[in-house]
């Protein structure tokens, strides 16, 4: 697994955990423990998100703010594998 | 509105192409219990939902289903990468290929194109939540059937993730049903507030209940 994939896995893991808490809170809105848990995961998401974009490029097009080139179009796209992206 | 993230919710990395399997799995893209139907169902139902918890739940699950649609598209794409004409003919993928080449098209495994007739949006809390509970189980069964027909570990890994999400969504809809179906009966049928309070033009005649 490349460094890019490892970091993407950490980001996706934190996002997934936050989403699970989000869905749970939709039906348990007064569960403060769950709310704190979601907030903790969201802090992790923000941290990994920033690190990923610094090293590997934007995850949303708005993250290009301040950049000089339009790296949004750079490979790989999510459905491509790494070798295909190099073609 | 929505914003696109250039990543999959869960990774899809398939080493070996398998057009026969792609033709089965495409059912979760555009078939009767697929991810497109799921997303459109929840994102449409939420407008007429009178309770904030349910508006939130339908928005959040409807959004996640779009991420699942993208994963299914990625699976079908990777299973049909670098095919030879010979492989296309031998696998039976030729019947898809003739209409779509290797483009991803919302269609059932049987060949029936996607239709909104797969979903319902009824404007009634009890009816819509029961539709949603059934939809999650139908999708879970479809993923079970895919797992019965598939022995590629790369594909099974992603399919097992998607199957598990159906179970979690069913759980959340079940909780929503427990907490809000009775409330809906009391608010709008027994007390007879009528739905017009929340923008719907229809009054419920409490005498008839």
Image: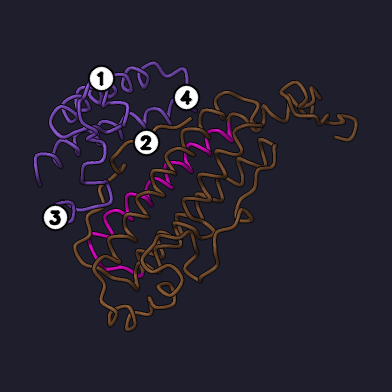
Within 10 Å of disc 3 (Cα), the crowding (few <14, some 14-19, many 20+) is: few
Q: Residue at x 65, y 43 (%)?
A: B121
Q: Identify residue for label 3.
A: A83
Left or right: residue B100 compared with residue B47: left
Q: Identify residue for label 4.
A: A28
Mark toward the viewer: 3 or 1: 3
Disc 2 is placed on an element classified as: loop
Residue A85 image offset from top left, x and y in percent: 18, 51
Q: Which mark is residue B142?
A: none
Q: Which residues are magenta?
A: B149-178
Label 2 – label 3 distance at C-alpha: 24 Å
Label 1 – label 4 distance at C-alpha: 21 Å
* Up-down relation of residue B128 to residue A30 (above or below): below
Label 3 – label 1 distance at C-alpha: 32 Å
Within 10 Å of disc 4 (Cα), the crowding (few <14, some 14-19, many 20+) is: some
Q: Identify residue for label 2.
A: B4
Q: Identify residue for label 1.
A: A43
Q: Residue at x 34, y 82 (%)?
A: B89
Q: Chain of mark 2?
A: B
Marks 1/4 in contact by CB < 8 Å: the verdict is no
* Up-down relation of residue B166 to residue A16 (above or below): below
Within 10 Å of disc 2 (Cα), the crowding (few <14, some 14-19, many 20+) is: few
Sequence-wise first label, 1 or 4: 4
Q: Is residue A20 magenta?
A: no
């Amino acid at each position: 697994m490349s460094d890019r994939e490892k970091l993407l896995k950490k980001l996706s893991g934190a996002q997934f955990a936050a989403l699970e808490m989000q869905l749970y809170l939709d039906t348990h809105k007064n569960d403060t423990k769950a709310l704190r848990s979601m907030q903790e995961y969201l802090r992790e998401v923000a941290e990994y998100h920033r690190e990923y974009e610094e090293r590997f490029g934007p995850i949303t097009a708005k993250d290009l703010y301040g950049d000089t080139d339009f790296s949004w179009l750079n490979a790989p796209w999510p459905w491509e594998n790494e070798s295909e992206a190099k073609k | 509105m929505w914003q696109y993230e250039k990543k999959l919710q869960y990774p899809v990395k398939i080493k070996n192409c398998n057009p026969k399997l792609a033709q089965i799995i495409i059912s979760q893209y555009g078939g009767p219990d697929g991810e497109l139907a799921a997303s459109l169902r929840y994102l449409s139902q939420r407008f007429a939902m009178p309770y904030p918890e349910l508006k939130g739940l339908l928005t959040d699950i409807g959004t996640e289903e779009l991420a699942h649609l993208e994963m299914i598209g990625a699976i079908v794409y990777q299973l049909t990468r670098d095919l030879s004409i010979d492989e296309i003919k031998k696998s039976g993928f030729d019947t898809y290929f003739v209409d779509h080449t290797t483009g991803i098209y919302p269609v059932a495994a049987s060949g029936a194109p996607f239709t909104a007739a797969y979903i319902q949006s009824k404007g009634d809390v009890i009816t819509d939540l029961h539709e949603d509970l059934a939809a999650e189980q139908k999708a879970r069964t479809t993923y079970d059937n895919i797992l019965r027909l598939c022995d590629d570990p790369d594909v099974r890994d992603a399919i097992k993730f998607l199957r598990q999400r159906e179970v979690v969504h069913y759980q959340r809809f079940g909780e929503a049903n427990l907490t809000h179906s009775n409330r809906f009966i009391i608010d709008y049928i027994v007390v007879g507030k009528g739905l017009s309070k929340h923008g719907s033009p229809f009054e419920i005649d409490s005498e008839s209940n």
